[in-house]
Amino acid sequence: MTKTLILNGPNLNLLGQRQPEIYGAETLADVEAACAALATDLGLGAVACLQSNHEGQLVDWIQEARGTRDAIVINPGAYSHTSVAILDALNAFDGLVVEVHISNIHRREAFRHHSYVSGRADAVIAGLGTEGYMAALRYLARHA
């Protein structure tokens, strides 16, 4: 079994309410429930899902995952484009890292085209909507 941590960054607690034309109608609770069900079906075991609007909290959770988790699926939200701190924390994590973006960040504003997190990620999934989380779990089932 793979011990997986799913981290969501700022504003993802507003899924289903914030810009549904970009992010869809599913709530974060819907995504977390779908991830838990698929992880079980794939034999990955239970996943832990956490969300924070605070960069330092995300860094703390990544550090706590060292030695206790095999993989991190992370949607860093806007921190993708600004956070060297999250990148540094991920660089100190020995397991697999999959970066997920609900929208295709490369078809959006120019400042969203670069992600610091991508420099550490073993895989990057963008533009699949919330199905990107399921793709991340399927990747882990094959590569963990």
Image: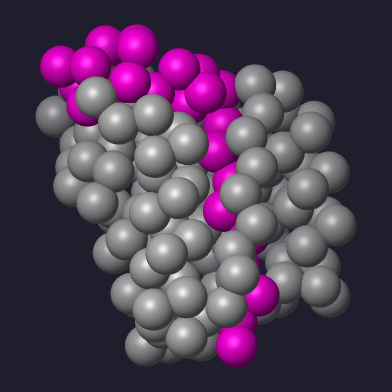
Camera sees residue 118: no
Q: Provide residue 3's location: percent of width, then percent of height.
A: 65, 75
In this rendering, position of residue 6 left or right of residue 89: left
Question: Residue farthest to the top?
Answer: 18
Classify 55 as above or below 49: above
Q: Is residue 134 visible?
A: yes
Q: What residue appears at the point 47 percent right and 36 percent down from the top-left corner?
A: 29
Q: Which image quadrant is residue 133 in?
A: bottom left
- Residue ID at (43%, 58%): 35
Check if residue 70 falls in the magenta segment: no
Residue visible at 26% across and 11% down?
A: 19
Q: Position of residue 76 (x, y in %)?
A: 52, 37
Query: In this rendering, is residue 60 above or below 35?
Result: above
Q: What residue range appears in magenta? A: 1-24
Taking depth in this image into account, of 115 and 144 the one nearest to the observer is 144
Residue 108 occupies quadrant: top left
Q: Position of residue 10 (x, y in %)?
A: 56, 23
Is residue 2 rendered magenta in the image?
yes
Q: Is residue 127 left or right of residue 91?
A: left
Q: Nearer the viewer, residue 58 or 19?
A: 19
Q: Percent from the top left, x then y, of residue 83?
A: 62, 32
- Is 29 rendered above or below residue 55? below
